[in-house]
């Protein structure tokens, strides 16, 4: 379905419309209570806020929109707070799921930066069905909202063998427990990406204080274990990227809304396995972008609100023909011009 949701990167954190407020919704823990409520009953499943919706929100959303933290001034831990919405608007339109970000953002594909929950597995089909039907029938906060006549059966996942990350991390030991503890206590969100726990997704965008030397020292201690790294909106500097460059297994890097510049991008040349890079709303320009031409595995690059020009983007696209460059809706598609005279037979002198 189509949805009027701008990408997360289209505006600074203080001015983005609600749908792009990053939710941290509880990491990778599935809403087992909601899942059982929706799929574990023989026959019909009654969907109510107390029995079905609230457990989903509690498991996946309260960590960033609950009593202890309210990203975007949004709380989802009470009916009154949900009705109030956040700093950037309503999250729920009773009777209309398509106009309710509380539901629509859960439908986005896994590769979309705006999908909610932002981390971990997506909501199950049963959970999104419950949200849709609950909203469609009025979003009542008590009583029975609707009866789903037929629940989807729960099936065991198909084992497809080890992932690329599992293979890449097979020979790594365990990450430094002290560094993990220190970063987590500082507000970092860290979760394993591999079965052996050696490959990590590290999110430092929610630290309780500005990113500093002590955090980078702790990151350095687990550098070889970091496969995904989120630094968006942090105080990371060009010099600080020297620590990031030590994350030699890094495949995803989010640097949006930071002050890193062209000088900093020179450091990233060492990250030859990088596949995803977000440079939204940074001072990066054409000179810095040229440093990425050697990253042959780079697949997706986000440059909205940067200083990169059409020429700079086209030059990089020529060097990396498989790279998808996203510069936002106000820019035309990057076109790589053919060299002058290409395909034409030269005239004899």
Image (spheres, rainbow, N blue to C red):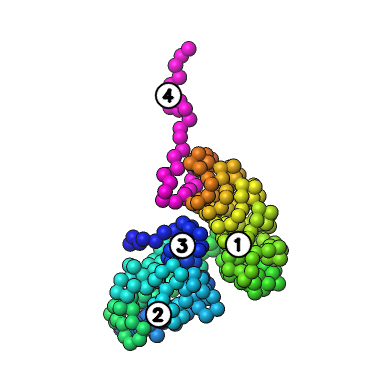
Real-space Cα separation, disc 1 to disc 2, in angstroms: 33 Å
The span shown in magenta is: 320-349
Mark number displayed over residue 148: none
Q: Mark 1 or 2 closer to N-term?
A: 2
- Residue 88 in view: yes
Q: Position of residue 330 (x, y in %)?
A: 42, 48
Real-space Cα separation, disc 2 to disc 4, in angstroms: 65 Å
- Residue 252 in view: no
Q: Residues within 10 Å of mark 4 (few under 14, many from 20)?
A: few
Q: Position of residue 58 (x, y in %)?
A: 47, 79
Q: Mark 2 or 4 closer to N-term?
A: 2
Mark number displayed over residue 16: 3
Q: Residues within 10 Å of mark 2 (few under 14, many from 20)?
A: many
Q: Residue at x 39, y 68 (%)?
A: 101
Q: Residue at x 58, y 68 (%)?
A: 206
Q: Position of residue 22 (x, y in %)?
A: 49, 66
Q: Would you place residue 161 above or below residue 62 in this image?
A: above
Real-space Cα separation, disc 2 to disc 3, in angstroms: 26 Å
Q: Nearer the viewer, mark 1 or mark 4?
A: 1
Residue under circle 1? 234
Real-space Cα separation, disc 3 to disc 4, in angstroms: 49 Å
Residue under circle 2? 53
Q: Residue at x 56, y 45 (%)?
A: 285
Q: Would you place residue 242 above or below residue 50 in this image?
A: above
Q: Mark 3 or 4 closer to N-term?
A: 3
Q: Residue at x 28, y 80 (%)?
A: 149
Q: State yes or no: residue 105 in magenta.
A: no
Residue under circle 4? 344
């Amino acid at each position: 379905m189509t949805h009027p949701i701008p990408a997360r990167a289209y505006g600074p954190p203080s001015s983005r419309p609600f749908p792009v407020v990053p939710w941290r919704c509880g990491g990778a823990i599935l809403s087992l209570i909601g899942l059982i409520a929706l799929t574990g009953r023989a026959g019909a499943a009654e969907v109510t806020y107390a029995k079905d919706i609230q457990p989903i929100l509690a498991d996946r959303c309260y960590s960033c929109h609950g009593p202890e933290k309210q990203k975007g001034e949004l709380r989802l831990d009470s009916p009154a707070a949900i009705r109030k919405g956040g700093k950037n608007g309503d999250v729920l339109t009773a009777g209309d799921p398509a106009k309710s970000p509380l539901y629509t953002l859960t439908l986005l594909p896994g590769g979309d930066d705006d999908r909610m929950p932002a981390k971990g597995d997506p909501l199950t089909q049963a959970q999104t069905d419950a949200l849709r039907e609950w909203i469609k029938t009025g979003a009542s906060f008590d009583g029975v909202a609707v009866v789903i006549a037929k629940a989807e059966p729960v099936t065991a996942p198909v084992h497809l063998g080890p992932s690329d990350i599992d293979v890449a991390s097979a020979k790594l030991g365990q990450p430094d427990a002290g560094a993990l503890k220190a970063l987590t206590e500082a507000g970092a969100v860290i979760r394993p990406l591999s079965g052996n726990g050696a490959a990590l997704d590290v999110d430092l965008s929610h630290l309780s204080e500005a990113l500093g030397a002590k955090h980078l020292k702790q990151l350095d201690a687990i550098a070889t274990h970091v496969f995904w790294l989120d630094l968006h909106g942090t105080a990371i500097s060009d010099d600080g990227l020297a620590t990031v460059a030590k994350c030699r297994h890094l495949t995803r890097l989010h640097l949006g809304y930071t002050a890193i510049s062209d000088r900093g991008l020179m450091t990233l040349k060492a990250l030859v396995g990088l596949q995803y890079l977000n440079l939204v709303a940074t001072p990066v320009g054409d000179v810095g972008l040229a440093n990425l031409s050697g990253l042959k595995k780079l697949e997706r690059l986000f440059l909205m609100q940067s200083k990169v020009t059409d020429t700079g983007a086209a030059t990089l696209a020529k060097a990396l023909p498989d790279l998808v460059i996203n510069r936002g809706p106000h820019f035309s598609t990057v076109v790589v011009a053919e060299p002058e005279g290409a395909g034409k037979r030269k005239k004899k002198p």
